[in-house]
């Protein structure tokens, strides 16, 4: 079991620690609902240092990024980030990622913790352009400082104008007394804030200063359980649930980051799939009746025929009702369509809704 650099800090805070993607990670501290509400209304800090970080550099860096990712990285300017994915050769997805452009010859890729080795091997196998690749995952930590009060709570720690960093942009500067820290606004909660990328040896000092600076705003540490409820309320996909090696990225609603203005891995087949039209679609739904949908619960029609499966589901802390996502045939995917979630032996009425579920 791997440990993040702040493992001892989380244990000292009394976090409930669980195995996650090969790491010992804090799943909750005070409780999911309290932590969820802290991020929606105040400011909280996630340690997401289990995420992977790759550096692609050299004269052919862009060529490799373009080949392995679905989005068009040629549109990136320095200091801008882009959501994307690695298509595989079989119509599914190796991983969903964020690409950061540092300079014309340097890009960073943030990948999911459970896929670090798989992603590294995949990108390496496609690197016939001799781009320089470095796996920085073991040397860096990542803190996500999230919530509507994050900017004002943290501004005293840096000369960077935090309020000026737009969504999916980043800057590098001094933060909490540490130089060359990447501060990015690529959050996964829908409540604003930013992420801090720093070396492992610096992260404890940063963590301590973050909590000192945020004390007046009642800052709290937040676990991965609340991260999941927050992202689900926004309708954000999670690798292993909505996105998999088998699931079509077009059925998953990732057409907006699939750019056929360039060639990339499996682009011809994905283009053909788009032109033919998808058979199934990933939809958001909310329960009309009482119940909590869970991953892998069956989705059925009014006659009890199984038409799909729940990919993610929970009792929404912000909305006080059961919400979820899942794949259904296209004819059931229009907003307002009635579907049923099979919870134990009961078929519970739900309706298809537009995401995000949570609107500020």
Image (cartoon, helix red, strand yellow):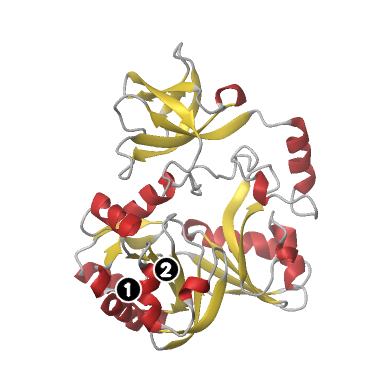
Q: Is residue 202 left or right of residue 238?
A: left
Q: Is residue 228 visible?
A: yes
Q: Is residue 73 left or right of residue 287?
A: right
**Does the CB distance between marks 2 and 1 fall below 8 Å?**
yes
Q: Residue 60: x percent and y percent?
A: 77, 73
Residue at 55% across / 23% down in the picture? 332
Q: Is residue 86 left or right of residue 340?
A: right
The image shows residue 269, relative to residue 110, as above or below, that is: above
The image shows residue 264, relative to residue 332, as above or below, that is: below
Cα distance between the residues tagged 2 and 1 = 9 Å
Instruction: Kindly state the secondary structure of the residue where label 1 is placed.
Output: loop
Q: Residue 15: x percent and y percent?
A: 23, 62
Question: Which sits in the foreground, 32 or 66?
Answer: 32
Q: Residue 218: x percent and y percent?
A: 24, 68
Q: Is residue 158 left or right of residue 292?
A: right
Residue bearing mark 1: 6
Question: Which sits in the foreground, 295 or 234?
Answer: 234
Residue bearing mark 2: 49
Residue at 72% across / 78% down in the picture? 105
């Amino acid at each position: 079991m791997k440990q993040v650099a702040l493992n001892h800090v989380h244990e000292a805070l009394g976090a409930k620690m669980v195995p996650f993607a090969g790491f010992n990670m804090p799943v909750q501290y005070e409780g999911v609902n309290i932590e969820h509400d802290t991020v929606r209304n105040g400011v909280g800090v996630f340690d997401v240092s289990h995420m992977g970080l790759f550096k692609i550099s050299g004269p052919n860096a862009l060529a490799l990024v373009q080949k392995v990712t679905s989005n068009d990285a040629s549109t990136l300017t320095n200091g801008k980030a882009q959501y994307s994915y690695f298509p595989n050769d079989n119509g599914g997805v190796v991983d969903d990622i964020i690409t950061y452009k540092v300079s014309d010859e340097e890009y960073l890729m943030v990948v999911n913790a459970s896929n670090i080795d798989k992603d590294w091997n995949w990108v390496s196998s496609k690197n016939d352009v001799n781009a320089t690749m470095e796996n920085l995952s073991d040397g860096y930590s990542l803190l996500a400082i999230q919530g509507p009060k994050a900017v004002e709570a943290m501004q005293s720690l840096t000369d960077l104008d935090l309020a000026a960093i737009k969504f999916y942009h980043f800057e590098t500067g001094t933060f909490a007394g540490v130089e060359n820290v990447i501060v990015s606004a690529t959050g996964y909660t829908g409540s604003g804030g930013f992420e801090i990328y720093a070396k492992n040896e610096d992260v404890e000092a940063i963590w301590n200063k973050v909590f000192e600076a945020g004390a007046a705003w009642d800052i709290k540490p937040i676990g991965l359980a609340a991260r999941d409820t927050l992202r689900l309320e926004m309708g954000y996909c999670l690798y292993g649930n909505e996105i998999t090696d088998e699931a079509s990225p077009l059925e998953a609603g990732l057409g907006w980051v699939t750019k056929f203005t360039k060639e990339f891995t499996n682009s011809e087949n994905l283009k053909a799939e788009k032109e033919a039209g998808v058979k199934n679609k990933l939809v958001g739904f909310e329960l009309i009746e009482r119940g909590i949908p869970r991953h892998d619960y069956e989705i059925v029609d009014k006659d009890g025929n199984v038409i799909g499966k729940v990919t993610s589901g929970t009792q929404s802390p912000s909305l006080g009702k059961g919400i979820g996502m899942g794949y259904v045939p296209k004819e059931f995917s229009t907003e307002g369509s009635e579907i049923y979630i099979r919870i134990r032996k009961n078929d519970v009425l739900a309706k298809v809704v537009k995401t995000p579920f949570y609107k500020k």
